[in-house]
Image (cartoon, rainbow, N blue to C red):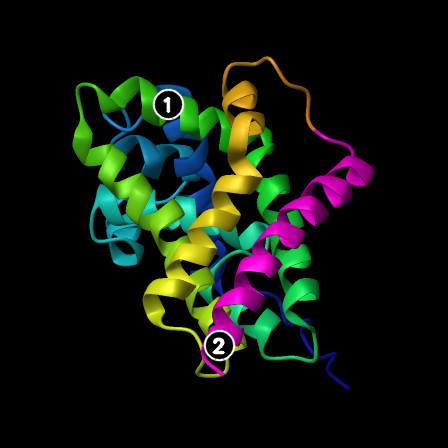
Amino acid sequence: MATAKKQGRPKSEEKNSLILDAASCLFLKDGFANTSMDTVAKASGVSKQTVYSHFDSKDSLFQAAITSKCRTYQLDAQQLVEASSGTMSFSECMKKVGAQFVRLLQDKEAVAMFRVIIAEAANNTHVANLFYQAGPQAYLATLSSVVEQYGHGKLSKDCAHELAFDFCSLLKGEFHTMMLCGLKAPMSEESIEKYVSRAVEKVELLFTHYTSQAD
């Protein structure tokens, strides 16, 4: 009797992952401008044609690498929406999302990527825009939708966006600036919990204020 062949990831998914991993390393090491689709193909062990079959341009590959890093910390659009569609309260959801956001902010690769973007931004605003659209802007837009969802019709899109923006600003604060400058060590899990809880308390006060005004 023939033994069933063990099912693994589809080849296309494996190649996609290889390409993303190789591209992420090259973007961090050489920067956006000095990374080409040719070098990504060589580093990932696939043909240039294969790279283009997965990503139609270096721009889309770069943004996919940013999105992939966010997904690692459950901060992509789908996972954020799923977090808010369960039984968690607003406070519980914000604590979960906030903790993951802080973990991303202090991730070594994420910090390195921020530094790469800052270094290139002066001469290449295009790469800064790509990073902002795929990372901060996409995350903020989705978090705004999550906050609005918790408002149950009592929050306008503008108010939800303001609350999401304030929450991210509280979490980044001086901590993120010091991380980028190499002046701050990553927080422990216990410190993250306390840090995020303080930010959630402040945003929850605003959330309650805005939603009560609608009654």
Residue at 33%, 39% (x, y): give it.
41
Q: Check disc 1 and report the residue beneath it.
A: 116
Q: Is residue 47 above or below residue 78?
A: above
Depth check: give the residue in front, 169 or 55: 169
What's the CA distance linking mark 2 and mark 1? Answer: 35 Å
Depth check: give the residue in front, 43 or 207: 207
Nearer the observer: mark 2 or 1; the answer is 2
- Quick check: can you spot residue 189? yes
Q: Check disc 2 and report the residue beneath it.
A: 149
Tell me the SS state at disc 2. Answer: helix
Q: For the magenta stretch, what is the residue range?
A: 187-215
Amino acid marked by disc 2: Gln
**Rendered location of residue 168, percent (x, y):** 50, 46
Q: Is residue 193 above or below residue 11?
A: above
**Rendered location of residue 17, percent (x, y):** 48, 51
Tell me the SS state at disc 1. Answer: helix
Quadrant into which the N terminus falls: bottom right
Q: Is residue 107 above or below residue 83?
A: above
